[in-house]
Image: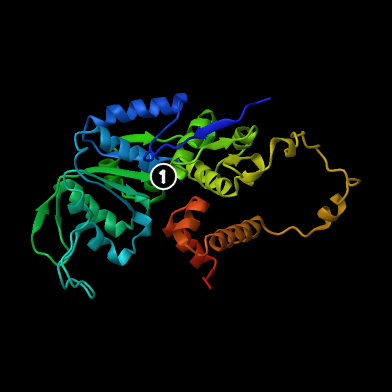
Amino acid sequence: MSKPHTLAAGKHAAPPQLCGDSASMQALRAQISRIARCAAPVAIRGESGSGKELAARAIHAQGARAGGPFIAVNCGAIPEALMEAEFFGCRAGAYTGALHERQGLFQAADGGSLLLDEVDDLPLAMQVKLLRVLQERRVCKLGGSRDEAVDVRMLCASQQGLARGVAAGTFRQDLYYRLNVIELAVPPLRERLGDLEVLCRTILLRLAPRQAVILAPGVLAVLARHGFPGNVRELENLLERALAFADGGVIVPDGLGLPSPAAVLPLKPAPLAPQLSQPGMAARLEAPVVPLAQYLCQAEREMIVLALRQSRYHRARAAQQLGISVRQLRYKMQKLNLQEP
């Protein structure tokens, strides 16, 4: 019989960091150590919630710019009309509502590192302006007349990789060559399930730094059977929920809200032809067949509505749950004619 795992006991929370002893994580940390020694731009690829920003912070912290600022921005969360002012700053009166002069992201990150998360969500017009800044290392504030020199190490992150955007025609090839000098891939959680225990320990120390939390037998087994489409971020959400329902600091399998190993039936090979004698099979065969595109569209609509309701129509949280960017969610809502109440 497996023993319970005691994971936290009155310690202070550690800042989020890449953790895990799996071969893929050891290789990732070794890559980061080498990458940090140079100043070349880095394109980080990985699924939503896998730890792309943590990898970027590790590159910054281990490099020569560790004493400088680290600025991270989600490109999909910035309205297109405000992008130029956000990135390059603006002078007072540059546009309606610009009452004061303000610096942009490049000026704020001067001497440090700038992470452009979901960089493939940038519109093409903004990609042209970003390319010019990377080539000249100078920015001009919106409404200004002179350029200012900036010294920034560029880091960017995307879920599918920038090459896919280039192939689709949504990402400029010249900008791709500027940003994708070094590519770093962050593995998804399902490919490193051996790290579950150390991840649980790290997350629970952050969620409950002064409480001794115990994982009851079977918890890690239930977690290991889960696919984790939301990766480490999803694991953190599961543990936070389980901690809220934990009795005396003991997290049990049922508290995760996932099926236990005993409840999961072993997979059996499906018969080549359905047997009409099976209960309900005849009724299913008589159901009308709809075009696959129509069925997929309806399924997508239902999942988006579910995510919006669960997040109380907070688009950023809903997009995280769905594994897409805020810009993609906004596009899908317009396409499906979904409106918030």
Instruction: Kindly indicate the quadrant of the structure image that contains residue 216.
Output: top right
Q: Farthest left residue?
A: 146
In percent of width and height, residue 105 lies at: 23, 54
Choose between 212 and 90: the one closer to the eye: 212
Residue at left offset 44%, top offset 54% = 325
In percent of width and height, residue 324 lies at: 47, 52
Q: Is residue 59 above or below residue 87?
A: above
Secondary structure beneath disc 1? helix
Residue at left offset 25%, top offset 55% = 128
In percent of width and height, residue 234 lies at: 52, 45
Residue at left offset 22%, top offset 45% = 69
Count of number-bearing discs: 1
| Residue that mark 1 sits on | 164
The residue type indicated by label 1 comes to Arg
- Other-residue count near label 1 (Cα within 10 Å), few / some / many at <14 / 14–19 / ≥20: few
In percent of width and height, residue 107 lies at: 17, 53
